[in-house]
Image: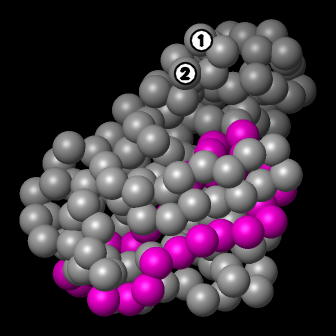
Amino acid sequence: MALRMWASSTANALKLSSAVSKTHLSPAAIFSLSRCFSSVLEGLKYAKSHEWVKHEGGVATIGITDHAQDHLGEVVFVDLPEPGGKVSQGGSFGAVESVKATSDINSPVSGEIVEVNKQLTETPGLVNTSPYENGWMIKVKPASPSELDNLLGPSEYTKFCEEEDAAH
């Protein structure tokens, strides 16, 4: 009960989407869902491959979700492309290496890479500690902003994560 109350109040304070706060679950179930509940921010779009995108002023900032970094574990290396390159929606543009595995990073939108987060070369752990702020990966000038319509919103992504975690 205390865990559910803490999760609900934390979600409200941080303005996070939370399926947990409206559900009567055991503490063990809440803990298993906490990964997804704590990782979904309003104002972003999400790919089923666990990347997020924030589109502002003609530029799309892209990174991996908190849910993804949590499953990866401690990130030790990030391989990113150079500015000026092209990405296509669903195509790989780099990789994240953690103590558990190496995973491709896919672009949620097509376009030209206009900036790369060079901080991740020196401090790859930013992906773990700040996936939506300091741990962003690339900025892209979208070729077709309508591709954002193919991505998940916060509540859809939350549901997707819950279903994916339940299947494993």
Quarter of the image that includes the N terminus:
top right
Image coords of residue 143 (percent x, y): 13, 71
Please name the residue shown 28% across and 45% down the image.
Answer: 151
Residue 32's x, y, as percent?
76, 23
Q: Nearer the viewer, residue 35 or 118?
A: 118
Residue ID at (53%, 75%)? 80
Q: Residue shown at 72%/40% (left/top)? A: 71
Q: Which residues are magenta?
A: 57-84
Circles 1, 2 touching at the beta carbon (< 8 Å): yes
- Residue at 38% from the left image edge and 45% from the top image edge: 47
Using the rendered view, name the quadrant where residue 70 is placed: top right
- How many tags in the picture? 2
Query: In the visual, does 122 lie left or right of 60?
Result: right
Check disc 2: other Cα within 10 Å, few if <14, some if 14-19, many if 20+.
few
The reply to whether residue 113 is visible in this rendering is: yes
The quarter of the image holding the C terminus is: top right
Q: Nearer the viewer, residue 44 or 109?
A: 109
Residue 164 - label = 2
**Quarter of the figure with residue 110:** bottom left
Q: Secondary structure at mark 2?
A: helix
* Left or right position of 56 against 62: left
C-alpha gap between disc 1 and disc 2? 5 Å
The amino acid type of the residue labelled 2 equals Glu
Q: Position of residue 96 (x, y in %)?
A: 64, 60
Disc 1 target residue: 167
The kind of secondary structure element at disc 1 is helix
With respect to residue 13, does 145 lie above or below?
below
Q: Amino acid at mark 1?
A: Ala
Q: Is residue 79 above or below residue 57?
A: above
The magenta stretch spans residue 127: no
The tag on residue 145 is none
As drawn, 127 above or below 29 = below
